[in-house]
């Protein structure tokens, strides 16, 4: 009974904050206008700014929710997504003594056996963890990240409430269904789950360090595994200026344009060479050391892109940079992201409509991330459900561009990366790309069949983690609106027929 009352009170509190920040437009129920007029604080701020303010007021879980929504330009629109990505996650620290207790419990050692010294005052505190500097017993400078006490329980409780709330809102307010809150909350829960086990973060740091071994333009601190556990992560300590401190870098005589070029290269290498990228590279997590080398920290949120998606991305980026919208459209069909019964012409027209205004700007002002964000808005209307990893990548590109612009407003960092992308394309698409330049070639469609089968299976069994899938709407329509557990065989035969028909018709 008591928990029910607590949940109810919390929900009323949430409703109040939402109303006051003038966000009832999202719910759009009869009378919502009047309620807003009476109770909302009027402001000229954009919806994204108002939403950010409300989420900060609602606390850590909601800040995380906002950060998740910031990767969904396809759902909330590109501008709101950009506004939400500014959400900073910082919180009052918990006492250092408590941090020490957690470390001792987790490592199963008295503090003095693990560390020679340990700063009780943290250097940073966020909703999931805080960081203390220390020196290990064998004399190494380290940064120790420690999970907040009881953070698992607090997040689980909030997430459960959020998930219940999402289901209610979805049922009561059809207008908000387009935000797919249930799915967003599920994604949030998954990513928080991973972030709350620091061994995952350690593994990500180690994998990335391996990928960049020998590259002294982009450094990753090494993991001290003997002082790492579920709730404690010990990393080699790094030092440097936050990457947006351009004036200070100049004052120290760093070559800022070279640093930008290294950042673009590192981004390219993460995404295209490795398919494993740091998805939270804001200036709080990216430093420039005294030799002018980039150093990254914080490997809690990472993204992966498989080889096929990298081919897709490279072709699309080059298509955009060359202003070849038809190519950009075709690659979506070729990859099977847009159902084959849609018109390539209409799709390339839609792409042009969002791309040309952006590409018409001077090259240094072109934001490829905005372009992708708007593209995802368009693809949503073409029944394409975007891969979560692509959305995460788009957000990361947005952040990278922000840094790039700070470092050198006259340079477009993707132009810097363009030769690398083109070279990678030549090496990786090579012969196949030259021989088969026609998009809808039967042989190629046959090549795609195993993947189509796989996609169908995935979309039907709803195993969406990280993989591309057909828009559920598309599958349902194809099955004449049969919602009651479509048979796999039916869906497969539809997909095969559609793929072959497309191949024959468009060849
Ligand atoms: N290895 C490190 N060396 C030096 N400082 C670090 C290191 N790791 C983290 N920090 C500092 O602590 C801050 C918070 O750590 P971070 O891993 O980014 O946590 P969060 O996930 O809470 O953002 C960083 O912004 C950085 O200032
Ligand atoms: Mg951080």
Image: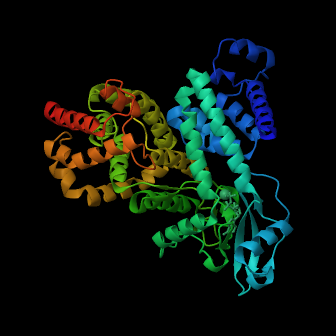
Q: Give the quarter of the figure containing the N terminus.
A: top right
- Residue 252 vertical placement versus 177 (above, below): below
The quadrant where ligand 2 appears is: bottom right
Residue 91's spot in the image, x, y percent?
A: 78, 52
Residue ID at (74%, 28%)? 15
Image quarter of residue 334: top left
Position above or below: 338 against 175: below
Residue at the limit of the structure toward the bottom, as seen here = 138
Left or right for 246, reference 389 = right
The residue nearer to you, when weighing 180 against 427, is 180
Residue 165 left/right relative to 41? left
Q: Is residue 94 above or below residue 312?
A: below
Percent x, y for residue 400?
Answer: 55, 51
Quadrant of the frame with the C terminus: top left
Residue 63 appears in the rendering: no
**Residue 24 placement (x, y as % from top left):** 69, 22
Given the current orientation, which residue lies at the most extreme front position?
Answer: 1
In the image: residue 316, left or right of residue 124:
left
> Which quadrant of the structure image shows residue 501?
top left
Residue 216, percent from left and from top: 52, 73
Q: Quadrant of residue 307?
A: bottom left
Residue 148 in view, yes or no = yes
Identity of the residue drawn at 55% across and 68% down: 203
295 relative position to 239: left or right: left
């Amino acid at each position: 009974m008591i928990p029910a009352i607590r949940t109810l009170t919390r929900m009323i509190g949430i409703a109040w904050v939402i109303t006051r920040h003038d966000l009832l437009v999202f719910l759009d129920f009869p009378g919502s206008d009047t309620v807003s007029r009476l109770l909302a604080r009027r402001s000229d701020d954009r919806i994204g700014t108002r939403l950010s303010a409300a989420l900060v007021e609602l606390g850590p879980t909601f800040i995380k929710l906002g950060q998740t929504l910031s990767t969904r330009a396809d759902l909330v629109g590109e501008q709101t997504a950009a506004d939400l990505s500014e959400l900073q996650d910082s919180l009052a620290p918990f006492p250092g003594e408590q941090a020490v207790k957690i470390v001792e419990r987790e490592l199963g050692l008295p503090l003095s056996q693990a560390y020679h010294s340990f700063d009780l005052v943290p250097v940073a505190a966020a909703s999931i963890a805080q960081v203390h500097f220390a020196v290990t017993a064998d004399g190494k400078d380290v940064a120790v990240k420690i999970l907040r006490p009881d953070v698992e329980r607090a997040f689980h409780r909030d997430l459960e409430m959020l998930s219940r709330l999402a289901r209610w809102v979805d049922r009561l307010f059809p207008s908000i269904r387009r935000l797919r809150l249930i799915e967003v909350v599920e994604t949030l829960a998954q990513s928080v789950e991973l972030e709350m086990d620091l061994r995952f973060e350690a593994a990500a740091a180690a994998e990335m360090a391996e990928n960049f071994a020998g590259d002294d333009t982009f450094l990753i601190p090494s993991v001290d595994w003997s002082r790492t556990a579920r709730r404690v992560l010990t990393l080699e300590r790094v030092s440097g200026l936050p990457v947006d401190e351009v004036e200070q870098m100049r004052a120290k005589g760093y070559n800022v344009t070279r640093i930008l070029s290294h950042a673009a290269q590192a981004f390219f290498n993460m995404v295209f060479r490795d398919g494993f990228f740091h998805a939270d590279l804001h200036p709080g997590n990216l430093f420039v050391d005294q030799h002018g080398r980039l150093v990254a920290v914080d490997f809690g949120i990472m993204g992966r892109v498989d080889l096929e998606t990298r081919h897709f991305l490279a072709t699309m980026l080059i298509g955009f940079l060359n202003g070849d919208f038809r190519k950009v459209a075709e690659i979506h069909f070729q990859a099977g992201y847009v159902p084959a019964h849609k018109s390539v012409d209409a799709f390339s027209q839609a792409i042009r409509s969002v791309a040309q205004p952006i590409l018409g700007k001077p090259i240094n002002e072109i934001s490829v991330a905005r372009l992708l964000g708007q593209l995802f808005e368009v693809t949503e209307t073409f029944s394409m459900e975007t891969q979560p990893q692509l959305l995460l990548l788009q957000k990361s590109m947005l952040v990278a561009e922000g840094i790039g612009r700070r470092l050198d407003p006259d340079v477009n960092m993707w132009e810097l990366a363009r030769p690398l992308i083109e070279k990678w394309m030549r090496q990786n698409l090579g012969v196949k790309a030259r021989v088969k330049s026609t998009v809808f070639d039967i042989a190629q469609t046959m090549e795609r069949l195993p993947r189509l089968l796989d996609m169908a299976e995935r979309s039907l069994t709803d195993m969406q983690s990280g993989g591309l899938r057909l828009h559920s709407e598309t599958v349902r329509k194809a099955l004449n609106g049969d919602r009651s557990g479509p048979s796999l065989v039916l869906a497969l035969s539809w997909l095969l027929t559609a793929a072959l028909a497309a191949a024959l018709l468009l060849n």
